[in-house]
Image (tube, rainbow, N blue to C red):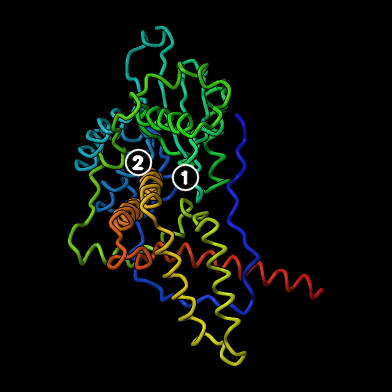
Amino acid sequence: MAKKTDPKRAESSAAQPEIKQPEVAAATFAPALAFAEADLEASADRAVAALAALPEAQHEALVQAWIAKANAAAVDAVSRDEKAPAKARKAARRGLGVLKSRGVSLPDHHTVAAALAKPTVTYEARMIFPDGQGTQMWWIAKVTSTGGSEVVEVTTHDRAGITKLDRGKPTSGNLKQVYHAWVGRVGRQPAIVPLEYARARIAQARALSVARKVVLPMGLDAAADLLEPAPPPGAAVAHPIEGESLAIPSEEGAVKARLESSMRLHEEPEFGTWLPENPAASQLLQSLNERVVALAEADRVPEKVDPIVNTAIEEAADAYFSEERKRLFAGRLADAAWSLLQAGRVDRAIDTVLVSRAIERAGVVSDRPSEIPFVRGMFLKLIAIAQQQAAQQMAAQAR
């Protein structure tokens, strides 16, 4: 499998060290219920024991986390074990249907005769969440019961289409290592997605490349056995996050409270590289420099600088989110929400869905993009990076 270079963070040297980041009041946030990695990856043999070690109130939540991570072995074991807690067994039985609908291979409980049968073939699709530029990767693998696999790795960009394609035949064990290596690179493993959805997204990216007259990578047609059948061009394909029964609030006060905490989403790996792109980034930093430099030396204090920074961010954020960018962000946020859900970060997935909806309905006069803390966080990160770079340059010059 070809290695993918990590997306680079936006860089700019326009900022001056005298610009100070405004203090952001810490928003009240109830952290998502987190389980130990050993519990999330519990094998069939220790699934029931993992439940028994937790308070009863957390049993169903752990089963839901297994479903999100596609831990079919644990879900199946609990569904069949009469010693498992009743509510957990019920949730696990429902979960088997969910996993099957996503194309996840379920444990085979056939007799010894099954071992003598012909090798079976299963398909699996995965994706990594999009980076701050709209680039992401997709994998479609055909895995045999004998341990072999064929996999195609496709890189897409939401404004250019397909940008790269690689194909290989790793063992199923090596393929798992490829997926696990992404934890060290971006903080998450690629998330399992329904096979039909992955094929649809890759087909849409191909159609976009053709429309933009972008040269398609070699080997695309040769990978048709893995990439097809796909829905016809223009066919509506629902995002898998829409099929989940997430407890997304609709009451205005509850929605507002969660949005006020949305800046915390930048703590998650899914949003580590999300920054405003050029030329908006350069324009913001240049505007800040000009406004701060215009202040008298004695006035360059937080009480005077912070309002200037806040105003500059508001102007930049509202100008940044055109109708086209709102549409792109809705897609990126949906994929990020799915990644969070697969990682067991259910609360953060819900917050991401709410941010996506808020950006989509953002207006020019009311409910502006700049009023969404998550959006402001993107611009604050940009300023913080620029400050850090300026400080490093000054330190280097002083040596």
Q: Would you name the residue on which mark 2 appears?
A: 68
Name the element at disc 2: helix
Q: Would you name the residue on which mark 1 appears?
A: 130
Around disc 1, counting alpha carbons within 10 Å, would you say few (fewer than 14), some (14 to 19), or many (20 or more)? Answer: many
Of badges 1 and 2, the one in the foreground is: 1
Give the answer, above or below, for where 377 lies relative to 90.
below
Question: In the picture, which quadrant includes the N terminus?
Answer: top right
Taking the image as shown, residue 323 lies to the left or right of residue 17, namely left
Name the element at disc 1: loop
Residue at (42% x, 7% y) in the render: 118
Three-letter code for the amino acid on which mark 2 is drawn? Ala
**What separation in Å lies between label 1 and label 2 (alpha carbons)?**
19 Å
Q: Which mark is residue 76?
A: none
Residue at (28% x, 32% y) in the render: 236
Q: Earlier in the sequence, mark 1 or mark 2?
A: 2
Q: Tell how many labels.
A: 2
Give the answer, above or below, for where 113 lies relative to 174.
above
Residue 183 locus on image (x, y percent): 53, 44
Residue 244 locus on image (x, y percent): 26, 42
Residue 104 locus on image (x, y percent): 36, 28
Q: Quadrant of residue 166?
A: top right
Taking the image as shown, residue 72 lies to the left or right of residue 211, namely left
Q: Quadrant of residue 175?
A: top right
Residue 181 in view, yes or no: yes
Residue at (25% x, 48% y) in the render: 246
Q: Nearer the viewer, residue 343 or 231?
A: 231
Q: Nearer the viewer, residue 316 or 396?
A: 316
Residue 340 in view, yes or no: no
Q: Nearer the viewer, residue 188 or 41?
A: 188
Three-letter code for the amino acid on which mark 1 is drawn? Pro
